[in-house]
Amino acid sequence: MPVLHRGSPRNFAFALAAILIATGCNGGAGSGVTPAASQSMLSSNDVARDGVSPDSSLLKLLKKQVVIGSVVDPVNGAGNPYGLTVAPITSGSFTQGDLVVCNFNAKSGKQGTGRSIIALHPAAGSTPTHVSSDKTLLGCDALALDGGDGIWGAAMVANDNPVLSSSGKLLENISGKPFDQPWGQIYAQSKTGSPVFYATNAGTGTVVRINLGSKFTYDVIGSGFPVNHGVPGTALAPSGLAYDASVDTLYFADGKNDTVVAFKDVTKIPNGGIKAKSNGMSFSGPSAGDARIVFSGTPLNGPISTALLPNGNLVVGNTLDPNGKNLMIELSAAGKLLDVRNVDKGAAGALFGIVATGTNDSNTKIYFNDDNANNVQVLER
């Protein structure tokens, strides 16, 4: 695969890989497959951790919904939060545990004109700290932090994947093939391999692995997933990546066909390994057996975000529910529907980035961006 960079990518990538290895984190409608059918696709890798039943809902236990704070950038007024993640360590602009947000809109409110990253301490009443507004972040819709708090962004409108320091300084701008309207981003440290990043593209419906080493290399491990070629603010495509290191499985949602998809043994999937067909409902390619539909259809409706819970369950956020519903949906890794929660009774399409923290049932928290209110909220006990 071609490697397109500015500056000195070889030296930068080599230094970055060394840092990551040393500081890796712990870490539309008409589907054609019914939820019952998708449940039968349980992989032998889909097992609960620490004896917690995969049929046990954590979302039902989180009765309190609390506002953390505004995401409006205090420097440039940007808002409409899309990407959301958590700082793994204290570095640069971040304190360990900080919530890190990228804003999709500028102060004008026009979709896709935002290029702002802010940070919030994870406590009610927090105020945002400006981190960056680099031009490479234009239309930032997702972001991930590496083990040293380095920021990796998916910028749909700039059509690039910028890498910034924990202080918000641009280090490297990854652009060109195989990136086409980047729409998802996740950092992944497997139990045995080197850390990598995964990204998805709204332009082509592809899933890309970014390999770190003496230079960046790219494997398009998944292709052919349905997209709607929507303009900023209406795009539907593979997004909302979540990674479970315990079973080396990558999850993502696709709002075009209302599915959640899993790639098992994802670090071993080669370039060209999985090709989606039949509107993303079946797979071919040498690694087709590693792909499965976790869940499809109602109540999924334009899902765009996911988060992995400590017991291996997933929460998924809808964007297209009618009647002003912003539903958060909990699924087991086997595809069983466990709970549905309306977290905002205002206009539909408010629920974007979601991230979970905690190590067990008793300390799990689910943070999410609420675009109606321009804030981050949390579900907790």
Image: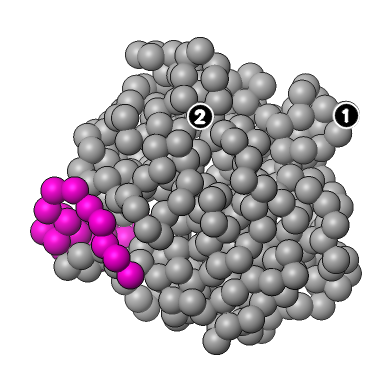
Q: Where is 37 relative to 5, above or below?
A: below
Circle 1: element type: loop
What is the x, y in percent for residue 292?
A: 68, 74
Residue 368 visible, this orientation = no
Residue 23 within the segment the image draws in magenta: yes
* Closer to us: 239 or 124: 239
Q: Which amino acid type corresponds to the residue marked 1 in the rendered image?
A: Asn
- Residue pictured at 57% horizontal, 40% vertical: 353
- Residue pictured at 50% horizontal, 24% vertical: 105
Q: Residues within 10 Å of mark 1 (few under 14, many from 20)?
A: few
Which of the labelled discs sits on residue 76, or is there none? Answer: none
Which stretch did the figure color magenta?
1-25
Q: Is residue 163 left or right of residue 327?
A: left
Q: Which amino acid type corresponds to the residue marked 2 in the rendered image?
A: Gly
| Display coloring | one colour
The residue under label 1 is 323
Residue 335 within the segment the image draws in magenta: no
The residue under label 2 is 112
Q: Where is 73 relative to 233, above or below?
A: above
Quadrant the N terminus occupies: bottom left
Secondary structure mainly formed by the magenta segment: helix
Circle 2: element type: loop
Q: Nearer the viewer, mark 2 or mark 1?
A: 2
* Closer to us: 362 or 128: 128
- Residue pictured at 36% horizontal, 63% vertical: 210
Cα separation, mark 2 vs mark 1, equals 25 Å
What is the x, y in percent for residue 42?
A: 73, 78
| Mark 2 or 1, nearer chain start | 2
Residue 239 visible, this orientation = yes
Q: Quadrant of residue 336?
A: bottom right
Q: Is residue 188 left or right of residue 195?
A: right
